[in-house]
Amino acid sequence: MRIEEHPILEFKKDKKINFTFNGEKIEGYEGETIAAALHASGVKVLGKSLFLHRPRGFYCAIGNCSSCLMTVNGVANVKTCVTDLEEGMIVETQEGKGVIV
Amino acid sequence: MRQAELLIIGGGPAGLCAAISAAKSGAKVLIIERNKYLGGQLVKQTHMFFGSEKQYASTRGIDITEILLNELDKYKENVEILADTTVVGMYEDGIITALYKEDDFFKISAKAVVVATGAFEKSLAFPNNDLPGIYGAGAVQTLMNVHGVKPGNKVLMVGAGNIGLIVSYQLMQAGVEVVAILDAASKIGGYLVHASKIRRMGVPILTSYTVKEAIGKDFIEKAVICQVDDKFQPIEGTEKEFDVDVMCISVGLTPLNELLAMRGCQMKYVPQLSGFVPLRNENYETTIENIFAAGDTTGVEEASAAMVEGYLAGLCAAAKIGYKTDDFDERKNDFVKQLDALRSGPVGKHILSGIEQIVV
Ligand SMILES: Cc1cc2nc3c(=O)[nH]c(=O)nc-3n(C[C@H](O)[C@H](O)[C@H](O)COP(=O)(O)OP(=O)(O)OC[C@H]3O[C@@H](n4cnc5c(N)ncnc54)[C@H](O)[C@@H]3O)c2cc1C
Ligand code: FES
């Protein structure tokens, strides 16, 4: 779901980045956030709510609301809407609160 | 601990202008911005700005950032920028804590601070409002205009203020269908030029409507809306359904004020300014000496006002710590006049009735 043509903007999508989402291989582009790359590949559900296990997607996309927390390279509670995609990243849906250290 | 003369928290239009103004006066300025880039909300705004010429009306938001950064570059010997860094605390003893990236934590002390953290988007209460696909208008803008990704195929826009209207237009520019725009108010809140442009493109604007519920399993598949009476109560039997994969919520912003509250600045809830805002004097100094605030964090307005407030707060903060220039009065009066002019219309009147309640 990438924008192909735009009257004002040009999007530099030069370098492809490979990463995995729950084990599945996905391609994104350099400069994108994790959430943007996932969304472009059709992944909208980024996690589950803590108690009622309702699906969670992003909401604010600027790091204010914590709706987009995921486990990235084994680190829990990463705000994927403001974290840039990197080659080989392992992105996973997080179960529960996530353990830090 | 890092020492700073003037610390500016937030590198949006208000923060950048505060930096320009203070650096021009001779103060050494440190800007801390949580994003990797400066410009705040401007970086995703592809439309021509409204406002007045001095604040770059009819220039695109994305280009205004460039103009401000070039201006700031003139004083580069006085300016240091720390991007990708979030200020996470402001304590009573004056210590300020910040986090570079995710794990590099450090302390700062500063002679004066300008808090210019902006605002964040409000949500709306209705059943299933947490389903993926229901996104803030700013989020949709960021996804499209910064990353070039479409939020979905069919969008229902909630809120017919300027942001709702502009983002609807930008969705169509990106090739996304907007099925309707709705607003609980009986009148369109945004400028009529934007509204008529959108109507001409065939998108209905439904006033006196609200969201009844969202329907979907893993993400939104359908939206149900209904009419409201003059007390904003839903009227039964007026429901309409839309098959949409995105609902975009554009019901306003509220000041991002946690740091000011944490520091102990006196705050007040002022509906006209969209939330809790700091009490301040005419120099934009809060009730705590040498802590200044500017931009949307002092009341949600527009980038034009945020810029001038930034210039004014930066000028006064610099003067307060010993950089009072000979032309101080002249510069200050100019900014005050610009703000008065910006607030001369009907919306400005509403804002002024809010400001009256916080200036001490
Ligand atoms: C869709 C849309 C259209 C708009 N159109 C117009 C228009 O046509 N004309 C107009 O005049 N205005 C317009 N506006 C309004 C305008 O964008 C805002 O009023 C303006 O950006 C406010 O500036 P600011 O500097 O106060 O805040 P922001 O631009 O929000 O900047 C705040 C900055 O602070 C940073 N920050 C926040 N917290 C921290 C922290 N703890 N540590 C470090 N950094 C932090 C943020 O990352 C951000 O960069 C529009 C807004 C939107 C959303
Ligand atoms: S979507 Fe709000 S913090 Fe990421």
Image: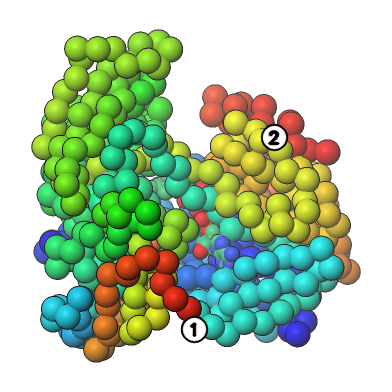
Decide: is B83 above or below A4.
below
Q: Amino acid at mark 1?
A: Val
* Eye-nearest disc, 1 or 2: 1
| Chain letter belonging to callout 1 | A
How many other residues sit within 10 Å of disc 2, few (<14), some (14-19) or many (≥20)? some
Q: Nearer the viewer, residue B279 or B343?
A: B279
**Residue at image x 74%, y 31%?**
B357
Q: Residue furthest bottom?
A: A88
| Chain letter belonging to callout 2 | B
State the separation of the CA atoms marked 1 and 2: 46 Å
Say which element carries label 2.
Answer: helix
Q: Position of residue B160 (x, y in %)?
A: 34, 31
- Is residue B22 visible in the rendered image? The answer is no
Q: Nearer the viewer, residue B73 or B106?
A: B106
Q: Left of B183 or right of it: where is B314?
A: right
**Residue at image x 30%, y 59%?**
A48
Q: Nearer the viewer, residue B290 or B170?
A: B290
Say which element carries label 1.
Answer: loop
**Residue at image x 75%, y 85%?**
B1
Report which quarter residue B147 is drawn in: bottom left
Asked if disc 1 and disc 2 are in contact, CB closer than 8 Å, the reply is no
Which residue in the protein does label 2 denote?
B355
Report which quarter residue A37 is drawn in: bottom left
Res B246 label: none
Which residue in the protein does label 1 denote?
A101
